[in-house]
Image: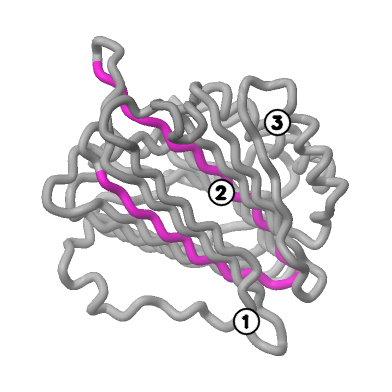
Amino acid sequence: MPATPRPPSSATAFRPVRGRLELGVSVRGGRSVASRQFHEGALRVLRPHYLDESGQVCYVVVNPGGAYLGADLFLLDVEVGDDADLLLTTQSATKVYRTPGAFAEQRMVVRLGERSRLELVPDQLIAYREASYRQRTLVTVRPSSSLVMAEVVTPGWSPDGGAFRYEEVRLRSEVHVETDAGSQLLALDNLLIRPPSGDVTGLGFMEGYSHLGSLIVVDARVDQALADELHGATSALDALTGISLTRTIAGTRGLVLRSLSNSTGELNILLGACTARLRRLWHGQEPLNLRKH
């Protein structure tokens, strides 16, 4: 499978790379296993485990440093080979503290092979007072691939309950479909959260909500009926949710869900309900139970 072009090395020259992780997964003996693994700095993965008998391998990304700081750069490269199945999560929330002088940044490149599957379900991103963070995720799929990516953005809080005011959070996700005719852009999700001065939850900003959840699904089975089903599953929860569909490329399609709430727990329940439906409907699996101690 052709590799997605990577940014030139000069693009990272002005900021230190605090952590680098490369993970490749392939099928061996009926189970998905790591075929390539490399880490340096403040990123690594725990030993793999299997949540059920499906053969899907689960890896947990760990940042021993505990947080992202100003000018930090973290690089992740993930490849899921043909027929392989990967669940990738984090050990704990990603915390972004004050970033005086320069933003913290994470860049992630993902490549999915034929009939491969990736569930990317990290814990929430917490942006604290005076934090500035940028995240770019570049995904290349095949028409037969299956992708689920979830994200929750949460403002940090002080001990007295007052809201910290982060400076900005930029999240950019690109999904390209690789076909015999070349690569085509399926979805571009470009999100900028820049709280106004004063309360993070002021009127006119994020409709008065403080927390944001996102879900991106790419699969040949995505259609309007699925979008309606997921919207119905979220309607009873205390969140404002919208769903949109992408165009179809080579038989595959994308779905983007965005949800606003005042609670991390509520968004985790909402996204968990959506991923549980997809796991049961498409793969006959139980809902995720990612207990992390």
Q: Amino acid at mark 1?
A: Ser
Pick whichever, 227 or 69, lies toward us: 227
Quarter holding the C terminus is top left
What's the magenta bit mostly, secondary-structure-wise?
Answer: strand
Category of crowding for the residue at label 3, using alpha-carbon neighbours closer than 10 angstroms: few (below 14), some (14–19), many (at least 20)? some
What residue is disc 2 on? 120
| 3 or 2: mark nearer the eye | 3
Measure the C-alpha gap from mark 1 to mark 2.
22 Å
Measure the C-alpha gap from mark 1 to mark 3.
32 Å
Secondary structure at badge 1 equals: strand
Quarter holding the N terminus is bottom right
Identify which residue is drawn at 43% across, 35% down.
Answer: 205
Q: Is residue 228 above or below residue 208?
A: below
What residue is disc 3 on? 273
What is the x, y in percent for residue 46? 42, 44
Category of crowding for the residue at label 2, using alpha-carbon neighbours closer than 10 angstroms: few (below 14), some (14–19), many (at least 20)? some
Q: Earlier in the sequence, mark 1 or mark 3?
A: 1
Q: Which residues are magenta?
A: 132-158
Q: Amino acid at mark 2?
A: Leu
Residue 229 figure quarter? top right
Measure the C-alpha gap from mark 3 to mark 2.
15 Å
What residue is disc 1 on? 183
Inspect the magenta stretch and tell me whether residue 146 lies in it. yes
Pick whichever, 131 or 150, lies toward us: 131
Q: Amino acid at mark 3?
A: Ala
Category of crowding for the residue at label 1, using alpha-carbon neighbours closer than 10 angstroms: few (below 14), some (14–19), many (at least 20)? some
Task: Specify the farthest residue to the left.
Answer: 101
What is the x, y in percent for residue 95? 31, 37
